C-alpha cells in the first residue's frame, strides 16, 4: 500500500466486522455549559462519516476529543486498537497514543509560515515519529503530487492560495499515516472559487478508501461522498443514517428545520 492509498472502502456503513472507530458516552462541558452529552457512534473502516449541524452543536468538539486535543469529561473512544476511557482521567502517554491514530485538517490551515511547503509536510513524521528526513521528504513529494501541488514544495504558505494551503494541510495530515482523517470545516474559510479544489482532493481520498470524519456545511459533498450522516444539535446526535435519508427525508423536525435554513436560506 502506498502513502496515498488506503484500505478498501466498505459499500455499507453498517457492514460486518468491527468498526475502526467506536465512541460511547462522550461528554464534555466548559464550565456550566454542556457541549457534548452522551454522544455515541461508530465509523466503519474505509467509510466517510459527515457531521452536520448548527454552530455550537458540538461537532468540532467531537473531533478534538477523538484527536485528544480536548480532554472529555466522560466516555470512551476507540480508534483501531487504541481505546481511551476519559472518565479514568488518562495521562499524557495515553492521550498521545490516541492522538497518533488520527490526523486533523483544520479550518484555518495552521501551517508554519516560516517553513517551506516541504518542511510543513515533513516536520510531523520527522519530529513526532522519528522518520529519517530523506524518507520523509520522498513521501512528502509523493503526497504533494497526489494533491496537485507537486511543483510547490519549495514555496512558503504566503505564496499559495487558500485552497492550495488547505491541500498542503491535507498532505501534512496524510504524512502522519493515520488510521483516521479528521476534517474540521476544511472549506469554510475559502473563497467560493477555491472550495471545489479542496473537496475534489477529499473525494479522491474517499474513493481511495480513507476512513474520514468530516464536519462540513457542504451538503452536496455530504450527499455524494458520505456513507453516513450525523446531525448534531445541543451536544447530542439527533439523527443519523445514510445521506439520502437524512438529507432528503429526515425523520426529526429539528433536522428538517436545519436543512431548510441551510439549503433555502432566503
Image: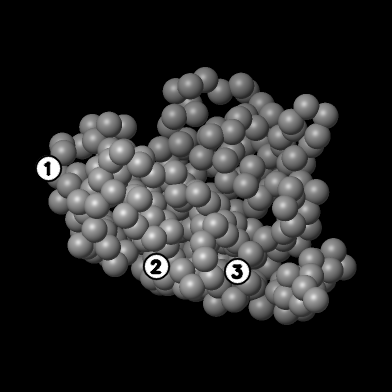
Q: How many marks?
A: 3
Element type where label 2 sits in the image: helix
* Picture residue at 62% right of the left edge, 37% below the top: 76
- Which dot marks residue 134? 1
Picture coordinates of residue 172, whole percent (x, y): 34, 49
> Can you say whether 84 is above or below 193 in the image?
above
- Which dot marks residue 218? 3
* Picture residue at 80% right of the left edge, 76% below the top: 266
Measure the alpha-carbon separation of dots 2 and 3.
Answer: 14 Å
Q: Earlier in the sequence, mark 1 or mark 3?
A: 1
Picture coordinates of residue 138, whole percent (x, y): 15, 51
Residue 119 figure quarter: top left
Are the two marked residues, 1 and 2, in contact with CB atoms closer than 8 angstroms? no
Q: Nearer the viewer, residue 149 or 99?
A: 149
Are the two marked residues, 1 and 3, in contact with CB atoms closer than 8 angstroms? no
Q: Earlier in the sequence, mark 2 or mark 3?
A: 2
Element type where label 1 sits in the image: helix
* Picture residue at 39% right of the left edge, 52% below the top: 169
* Picture residue at 77% right of the left edge, 73% below the top: 265
Q: Nearer the viewer, residue 106 or 208?
A: 106
Q: Is residue 222 left or right of residue 253?
A: left
- Which dot marks residue 201? 2
Callout 2 crowding tier (Cα within 10 Å): few <14, some 14–19, many ≥20: some
Amino acid at each position: 500500500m502506498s502513502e496515498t492509498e488506503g484500505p478498501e472502502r466498505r459499500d455499507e456503513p453498517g457492514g460486518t466486522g468491527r468498526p475502526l472507530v467506536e465512541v460511547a458516552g462522550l461528554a464534555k462541558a466548559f464550565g456550566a455549559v454542556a457541549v457534548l452529552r452522551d454522544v455515541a457512534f461508530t465509523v466503519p473502516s474505509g467509510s466517510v462519516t459527515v457531521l452536520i449541524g448548527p454552530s455550537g452543536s458540538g461537532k468540532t468538539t467531537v473531533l478534538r476529543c477523538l484527536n485528544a486535543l480536548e480532554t472529555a469529561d466522560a466516555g470512551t473512544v476507540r480508534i483501531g486498537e487504541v481505546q481511551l476511557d476519559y472518565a479514568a482521567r488518562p495521562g499524557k502517554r495515553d492521550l498521545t497514543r490516541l492522538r497518533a491514530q488520527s490526523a486533523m485538517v483544520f479550518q484555518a490551515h495552521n501551517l508554519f509560515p516560516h517553513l517551506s511547503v516541504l518542511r510543513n509536510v515533513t516536520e510531523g513524521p520527522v519530529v513526532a515519529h522519528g522518520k529519517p528526513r530523506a524518507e520523509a521528504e520522498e513521501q512528502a513529494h509523493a503526497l504533494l503530487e497526489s494533491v496537485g501541488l507537486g511543483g510547490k514544495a519549495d514555496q512558503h504558505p504566503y505564496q499559495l492560495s487558500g485552497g492550495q494551503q488547505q491541500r498542503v494541510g491535507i498532505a501534512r495530515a496524510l504524512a502522519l499515516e493515520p488510521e483516521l482523517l479528521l476534517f474540521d470545516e476544511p472549506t469554510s474559510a475559502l473563497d467560493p472559487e477555491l472550495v471545489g479544489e479542496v473537496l475534489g482532493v477529499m473525494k479522491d481520498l474517499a474513493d481511495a478508501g480513507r476512513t474520514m470524519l468530516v464536519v462540513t456545511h457542504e451538503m452536496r459533498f455530504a450527499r455524494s461522498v458520505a456513507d453516513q450522516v450525523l446531525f448534531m444539535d445541543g451536544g447530542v446526535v439527533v439523527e443519523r443514517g445514510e445521506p439520502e435519508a437524512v438529507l432528503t427525508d429526515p425523520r426529526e423536525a429539528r433536522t428538517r428545520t436545519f436543512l431548510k435554513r441551510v439549503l433555502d436560506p432566503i
